[in-house]
Image (tube, helix red, strand yellow):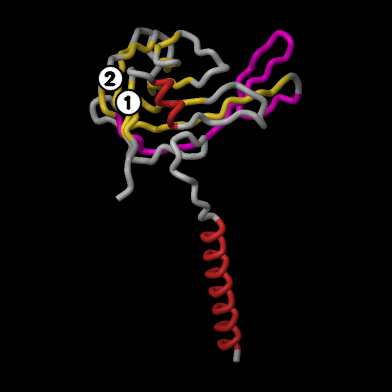
Amino acid sequence: MVRWRQLRKGTAWSIGAAMALVLTTVGCSITVPKDEASQFYAIPVGSKIILNRDLEVSPRRARVYIQDGSVVQSADPFAPQCNFEVEDVEPFPQTIQKDEFVVRKVSRDWRNVVVDQHIQLVSRSGMGSGTSDIFRIWHLWLASDKQPNVRKLLCSGVYAEPYRARTPSIQEIRATLGDIATLRLQTSN
């Protein structure tokens, strides 16, 4: 008798767990249209970023900023921007060489910029006072056998109030990179 109850409890639990798994999977299977103009269409893992020319990372810096197809010292926050990021910060200039990078991971994030009278802070959450406009960002984690120090390509949309901020579309990322880099999407088989 005890065994039958244990079996029934185990079976009921298994059926309940299976149903929850099915419902969760079905509920999470929202199809995002493959529209390169959509802010929701993520660059597929396995895509390639082809850097068409060498880029120099300034001393004591980890990033090279790109906007409107040009390398810039400081990006305009009110236009889409991308930046290549290296792992190591060095006291001397570093060169990111022409190369083909494979996108190994993609994530979507946001950065909050808080301005309070005399101080400007960049954080992941609101600081309680001042304005709190944000950037929405695609993180493209890169891999290259020749340049393992090149960590990722970050591309952000315009700096705006949270309800207006959005990640850049693939079309906007391509326009931002211009001739400096080429984005070749992984196609599904």
What kind of secondary structure does the magenta stretch mostly adopt? strand
Q: Residue 182 has which mark?
A: 1
At x 51% / y 39%, what residue is drawn? 40
* Front one among 49 and 10: 49
Of the residues shown, which amino acid type is indicated by label 1? Answer: Thr
Q: Is residue 107 magenta?
A: yes
**Mark 2–mark 1 CB contact (< 8 Å):** yes
Tag 1's secondary structure? strand
Relative placement, left or right, of 63 versus 78 is left
Give how far across and how far down residue 8 sits, in percent. Answer: 58, 83
Where does residue 4 sit, x and y in percent of width and height? 57, 88
Q: Nearer the viewer, residue 33 or 100?
A: 33
What range of the chain is rendered magenta? 101-128
Q: Residue at x 35, y 7 (%)?
A: 92
Indicate whether 168 appears above or below 176.
Answer: below
Marker count (numbered)? 2
Q: Quadrant of the N terminus?
A: bottom right
- Any mark on residue 52, and which? 2
Label 1: few (<14), some (14–19) or many (≥20) C-alpha neighbours in 10 Å = some
Q: Position of residue 129 (x, y in %)?
A: 76, 21
In the picture as drawn, the residue positioned furthest to the left comes out as: 146
Q: Residue at x 72, y 14 (%)?
A: 116
Q: Earlier in the sequence, mark 2 or mark 1?
A: 2
Report the side of 11 relative to 141 (left or right): right
State the residue in front, 161 or 32: 32
Inter-mark Cα distance, 2 to 1: 7 Å
Based on the displayed image, in which of its 4 quarters is residue 131 positioned? top right
